[in-house]
Image (spheres, rainbow, N blue to C red):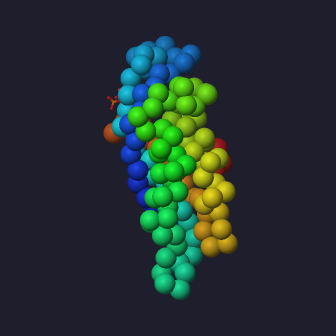
Amino acid sequence: MKVTKVFTFDSAHNLINYNGKCENLHGHTYKLEITVEGKPDKDGIVIDFVKLKELVDKLIIQKLDHQYLNDVLKFNTTSENIVVWIWNILENPLHTESYQLSMIRLWETATSYVEYTGTK
Ligand SMILES: Nc1nc2c(c(=O)[nH]1)N=C([C@H](O)[C@H](O)COP(=O)(O)OP(=O)(O)OP(=O)(O)O)CN2
Ligand SMILES: [Zn+2]
């Protein structure tokens, strides 16, 4: 069974080695979906939404919200690179005997998203 929590954060960035409008400083309200897969326990819970929220808030959102991503993340801040960075941070804390990180979806705009499952 899959459990998903949705977050938003507001950040500025600009792409490097990019010819076009996105080489200029601009901002997004990113939408981040974190999906955990596992077996419900005897009370019918895979992972407590509250616990998932606290973890992602602390490890991801607080680091990115209202920040200039190029300064915080020392790589080209494409959505593809950002989801891999998020995956690498969350993979261990969201891995227990009963559940594991399953999917990360990052919406950069209302019409553009990247999805990552830990493989290509
Ligand atoms: N594969 C990727 N392509 C682009 C990325 C990216 O992270 N991965 N990022 C950008 C820019 O950051 C840009 O802000 C997003 O571009 P775009 O989706 O074109 O944004 P629009 O607001 O113009 O979207 P529309 O809904 O089409 O108006 C560029 N490319
Ligand atoms: Zn952008």
Q: Quadrant of ligand 1?
A: top left
Does any portion of residue 60 appear in the rendered image? yes
Kindly give the residue lying farthest to the top in the view shown: 19
x, y (%) of residue 19?
49, 13
**Whether residue 28 is situated above or below residue 20 in the rendered picture:** below
Q: Would you say 38 lies left or right of 11 here?
A: right
Q: Residue at x 42, y 16 (%)?
A: 24
Q: Would you say 8 lies left or right of 47 here?
A: left
Q: Residue at x 57, y 76 (%)?
A: 39
**Whether residue 59 is situated above or below residue 53 in the rendered picture:** above
x, y (%) of residue 91?
64, 54
Does any portion of residue 35 appear in the rendered image? no
Q: Quadrant of residue 85?
A: top right
Depth order, front residue of 98/67: 67
**Whether residue 34 is situated above or below residue 62 in the rendered picture:** below
x, y (%) of residue 80?
55, 36
Q: Residue at x 33, y 39 (%)?
A: 110
Q: Quadrant of residue 113?
A: top left
Label total for image: 0
Kindly give the residue lying farthest to the left in the view shown: 110
Q: Residue at x 49, y 76 (%)?
A: 45
Rendered-image quadrant of the C terminus: top right
x, y (%) of residue 101?
59, 59
